[in-house]
Amino acid sequence: IQDDHKLSASELEEKYGTSIDKGLSSARAAEILARDGPNSLTPPKATPEIVKLLKQMVGGFSILLWIGAVFSWISFGIQLAQGAESPFDNLYLGVVLALVVILTGIFAYYQEAKSTNIMASFSKMIPQHALVIRDAEKKELPADQLVVGDIVEIKGGDRIPADIRLIFTQGCKVDNSSLTGESEPQSRSCDFTHENPLETRNIAFYSTTCVEGTATGIVINTGDRTVIGRIASLASGVGNEKTPIAIEIEHFVYLVAGVAISIGVLFFIISVSMRYKILDSLIFLIGIIVANVPEGLLATVTVSLSLTAKRMAKKNCLVKNLEAVETLGSTSIICSDKTGTLTQNRMTVAHLWFDNQIYSADTSEDQTTQPFDQSSPSWTALSKIVTLCNRAEFRPGQENLPIMKRVVVGDASETALLKFAEVILGDVMSIRARNKKVAEIPFNSTNKFQLSIHETDDPNDKRFLLVMKGAPERILERCSTIMINGKEEPLDSEKAEAFQTAYMELGGMGERVLGFCHLYLPENEFPDTYPFDTDSMNFPTSNLCFVGLLSMIDPPRSTVPDAVSKCRSAGIKVIMVTGDHPITAKAIAKSVGIISATSETVEDIAKRLNVPVEQVNRREATAAVVNGMELKDMSLQQLDEILCNHSEIVFARTSPQQKLIIVEGCQRQGAVVAVTGDGVNDSPALKKADIGIAMGIAGSDAAKNAADMVLLDDNFASIVTGVEEGRLIFDNLKKTIAYTLTKNIAELCPFLIYIIASIPMPIGTITILFIDLGTDIIPSVALAYEKAESDIMNRRPRNKRKDRLVNEQLAVYSYLQIGIMQSVGAFVTYFTVYAEQGFLPSTLLGVRVNWENNAINDFEDSYGQEWTKYQRTYLQWTGYTAFFVSITIQQVADLIIRKTRRNSIFQQGLFRNKVIWVGIFSQIGIALILTYGLGHVTALNFTPLRFQYWFVAVPFAILIWVYDEVRKLFIRRYPGSWWDKNMYY
Amino acid sequence: GLILLFYLVFYGFLAALFTFTMWVMLQTLSSDIPKYRDRISSPGLMISPKPDNALEFYFNKSDAQSYAEYVSTLRKFLESYDDLKQSQNINCTPGRIFDQNDVAVKKACRFNLSDLGQCSGKEDKTFGYSKGTPCVLVKVNRIIGLKPEGEPRIHCMSKEEGMVEINYFPPEGLIDLMYFPYYGKSLHAHYLQPLVAVQLAINSNSTKEEIAIECKILGSPNLKNEDDRDKFLGRIAFKVQMTE
């Protein structure tokens, strides 16, 4: 721990070899830079790219395909040694399988890399600069060039570029919220005020912001050695959990691999015991593996996820990790920040009180007028005070911007008042110019008011106007009259009571209340030339006339209440976690609906029943507001109890460290937790959460690094659209997988029947690859564009233990029902082709050995004709093509039925998703090209096919459609029935 | 329980559907000729006897056992060409296509075994194997409706000159057009495909050597014999190795 805060300026100069006036020399700075490295946080250690690539190539189904490739090469080796006639077939097959793995691996890697790149470019968007004294000159340098000993100057609005020991300050305040979570700006000075360097006032920390004032200081720590840097490196220690979708895909891969291996081994044993040669059995095994593995599926899933990620980016959710797309959809608890996320992050006038009446002001983001009644002369007086007793100013040159968007120099409340006045009165600056300021006492914390004296713009009125604003009770103390409907009336106890009630009411809404009063100074006592002196206060500051109250709040974003209620109907619990005061937090929670209008906290019930808090049955209260102080003393059990028993929770006055505790508590409930955060101190919580959401505007780099997602507009409502997309993609992935798995059975059955019935091979391994990686790819991606079947935001988040991506019903329905139907359709085509060429089905059974014998060149068909081996092989390829075409045709039906899981296709609309049609046309187009275009390339085993064979499977395709419609009809008709339980996936 | 019943019904239905569609499909087929014959437009050649795996003959002319299988295969193969079995067959006009399209009952042409001369197995019961002049019968694959043009004949040659002398029965390896066209198993039950016997008189100093022989069908423009991929289309290659 450093003791730089204890040292004097000259001791510091000596320690760091610098001079406060001249700074470091450039040469010296370069030396230190070379020694310490640049002043930036080291990004978390990235996995080397090659490791990422290799991971893609051995993950998922790749292992199975590698096994298939190795077996192919083994059988190639054996056949070569035996001098068989065409051993190269297996060599090629192995090469093709290896290529498939490598190419899909590269593809998945590329997709991942693309989404990571978006992030990388994003974090580089805002270069930081710092004003440094070097070689006795002020220079603007990139912040990462700073070194220890540099003298830097900061001013209001700057981000502190490193850990800095302050040596000169003027009204300097810093916002340490990203470090400590305190939302109030803290003043900084040159004095050593605390032993602890984190508490002392003379150090400003890297990545916090200077809110106002100016300061000069010596850089004492840079980069990873800063306090923030040390915290950030702690955050990388929090382990990264597997995303829910990764778990689901793993589960699915195990399932399919399990089926593939068990069928493969079973049929290996069967074929060996049927006296097939071991080598042949091995080749069958390869076929079975290839048929069972949906080679294109993982690539399809990646594409679907990245399509959704793109869609979400358009809606201001930037996803860093593709899988996080779905995580958001399964979220069951959102722990949201208040400031900036739920609220607009700017003070705005919310209520006014004058003439004994409370008026509400418009607090929306794009206000251009204020609707409340402005006819009272009291309002005229009040508006004058608001305008004049205010030091805030617009930065020049923003006349064309909407008022709410203009940048203001001044603190938060003055800014609010300035904008409020500008909206109602227009051109505040010229009003101020017409009412020239002659004296002013700025706000300070001892007298708690602000005062100024002005000439008036009424040429007939030579009086000076004294205007004052400040803490309402202090202002009231100084008043003897109160303005009602423009008339000054004596301030009696009744009127004081009314003031008290209004003040309490506004304060109870969590608003910051200011009182306003004025006094017209009598012309005779204060002539034109009167020398006002603010030090001796040679003017009255009591017996003023009270005009009214204004209350301000950081109002909720207008889209948030809707978003919160959407979360509610979507079964997502929204927990507010804020550093703010409980009353403010509760007020905002109520106004956005996190605490609903009817629910009460324990304290509310106690107040209503007029009993002590201890006597209230805690279970009756649905809402809870938990103070950070209480949280500190709570055991984990108590926290769990709160999280469990209350549906509406607000954590107020919490530190970012406590956020981590809250997140862990939610996860103990089995929830999928999304957490928003912007500060560096939030990064452990962001990492720990199932999905960490960093703020794009207010967020620190550390938070963005730790998060899985970045909200570009810092708006809570964007999270909800993200949830919607996440849920949709989960549903659509289900459809994609169901679609893809179905045809695997139609690819597998040929092998099984070939082994058992010894018919000529119905479909080749290469042909299967053409389906999996050719015709089927675009249609399965097209399902990602499918619209939701019903309002997905009206159902509960999925239970990660029960609602699997690939459940038993999905596998069984795809494999054992639709898949079998497809196989039947394809076999009918196969038998038709053979029968019409002369081999009736009865002739085909059991012919395998002779059929494949190269030496038999007078193989007799059902009509007595004799076939050479090559003529048979060519016919076999025609069979492959016919089988392929039939699967393709039936996959069109499969694609259409997969559009919905419950609704009729007609409810969903056949033409709403245009991409599906692109899929269908691509599917048929690719099949046409393969059959007629590449039908003469021997290696591909396709042959031109008679046109009518395309239609043999059409009745089966129609049957699939009709059957699925009936299935869906029964599911809709008889919810909860046996049918529903077994047939709904 | 219910689930088993469901699948029983479901698969029962699918099986019935499969059977039904297959039945419908088979109804559209003629039992006499296949619907399409485009996959076999030109016939392949095959020999008899056919050694087990590859087309390689190994025998010792002085060891009857070594060629017993060839001889019995030939004998069996020629059984259907026996004169007694051909009593129903008619004598056709040589050199002309025997068109029977208009006739309901298709007649088969007689193939005289004696045309095969020394390879007929009548005089030499070992088909020349014992004498070092083994006979190999070359046959043209049956294809329904095939009508060869020109004067088709089988011609064989050895790659190595002077190792073997080749004799053909019938002379010059001619295949008579009267055996064409074939009308299919059901209409043309007694059909006998024409044979050409190739007698290989192996040179006495070429014993123990492998002799590669290739036979081709020549003289007919519509019978292919040069296909790149199909090594048996209109041609056949085999090897003979004889020891003493």
Image (cartoon, helix red, strand yellow):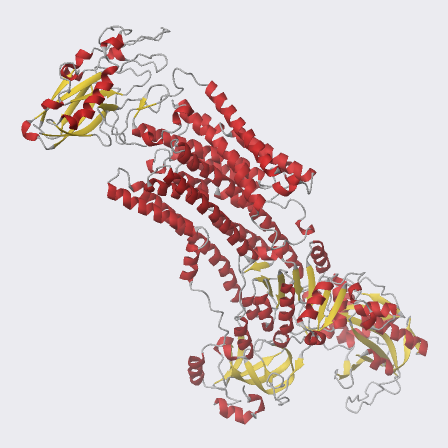
Whether A442 is drawn above or below A951: the answer is below
The quarter of the picture where the N terminus of chain A appears is: bottom right
Q: Give the total of numbered labels.
A: 0
Whether A718 is drawn above or below A702: the answer is above
* Residue A244 spot, x, y in % from top left: 57, 57
Query: Which residue reaches farthest left?
Result: B205
Specify the quadrant of the image occupied by residue A599: bottom right
**At x 34% / y 15%, what residue is drawn?**
B184
* Residue A367 spot, x, y in % from top left: 74, 62
Left or right: A497 in relation to A452: right
Which of the pair A75/A930 is nearer the observer? A75
Which of the pair B57/A21 is nearer the observer? B57
* Residue A25 spot, x, y in % from top left: 45, 86
Specify the quadrant of the image occupied by residue B200: top left
Left or right: A36 in relation to A166: left
**At x 66% / y 61%, what residue is drawn?**
A333
* Residue A125 spot, x, y in % from top left: 53, 66
Residue A912 seen by the camera: yes
The quarter of the picture where the C terminus of chain A appears is: top right
Residue A422 seen by the camera: no
Left or right: A340 in relation to A28: right
